[in-house]
Every structure is written in C-alpha cells, then in structure tokens.
Image: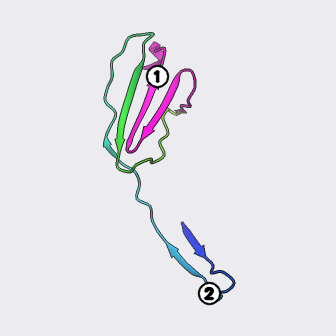
C-alpha cells in the first residue's frame, strides 16, 4: 500500500510518499490432529509469527463465525477455535 502524508497548513506545501510491504503472518506451530467424543468439545490451536494477526477459520471452503457452535479466541500469537457439541460432520 502507498500512504501519503500532507503537512499542516503552517508547513510547506510538499507531500511525501512512502511504500511499505507488510510481511505475512506464518504458522510457527500448525494445527494438530485432535480426538474428541461426539457431543463433546474440541479446541484447535495454532501459533503465528505475528501477534494479533487476522485469523480466519475455515472448514473446507466455508468460513466459520462465532456463535453457539464455534468460539474463536486469540491472544498474542496464539489462536484457538473451540467447537462445541461435536458431530461427525465436524471431522
């Protein structure tokens, strides 16, 4: 992205431009297989290289959202997905 800064009216009328490239967040620790019983709860965890990097949880092509079934947690570089009331379709 390119960002433009303009000085306040009391400064000169020039503008300065700069570009920066944000490094992507990568997995430091990927998801591990988890076993749980039907009707139970499973927690999936991963660790990223950047704190509070945006995380989107998906099941195949479907984006998951928080609600009665799913809870998303994130603290620092750690992200968790809690799945409640497990069903066979959750595997």
> Residue visible at 42% across and 10% down?
38
| Gap between marks 1 and 2 measured at Cα | 54 Å
> Residue visible at 63% across and 87% down?
11
Query: Does the rendering let one see residue 2?
Result: yes
Quadrant, the N terminus: bottom right
Left or right: residue 78 compared with residue 55: left
Which SS class for mark 1? Answer: strand
Which SS class for mark 2? Answer: loop
Give the percent coordinates (x, y) of residue 39. 45, 10
> Residue visible at 45% across and 48% down?
53
Give the percent coordinates (x, y) of residue 10. 67, 86
Identify the magenta region.
Answer: 63-91
Residue 67: within the magenta? yes
For the residues bearing labels 1 and 2, Cβ distance under 8 angstroms: no
Give the percent coordinates (x, y) of residue 12. 63, 89
Question: Where, by quadrant of the figure, is residue 46 drawn?
Answer: top left
Of the pair 56 and 73, the residue shown nearer to us: 73
Question: Where, by quadrant of the figure, is residue 47 drawn?
Answer: top left
Of the pair 62 and 81, the residue shown nearer to us: 81
Give the percent coordinates (x, y) of residue 24. 41, 54
Kindly identify which residue carries mark 2.
14
Residue 53: within the magenta? no
Residue 63 is labelled as none
> Residue visible at 41% across and 33% down?
80
Kindly identify which residue carries mark 1.
83
- Above/below status of 79 relative to 18: above
Direction right: furthest residue: 9
Which is nearer the N-term, disc 1 or disc 2?
2
- Above/below status of 25 relative to 85: below
């Amino acid at each position: 992205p390119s960002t433009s800064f303009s000085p306040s009216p009391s400064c000169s009328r020039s503008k300065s431009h700069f570009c920066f490239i944000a490094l992507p967040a990568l997995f430091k620790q990927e998801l591990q297989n988890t076993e749980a019983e039907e009707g139970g709860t499973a927690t999936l965890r991963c660790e990223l290289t950047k704190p509070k990097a945006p995380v989107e949880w998906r099941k195949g092509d479907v984006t998951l959202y928080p609600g009665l079934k799913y809870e998303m947690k994130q603290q620092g570089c750690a992200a968790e997905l809690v799945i409640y009331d497990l069903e066979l379709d959750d595997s």
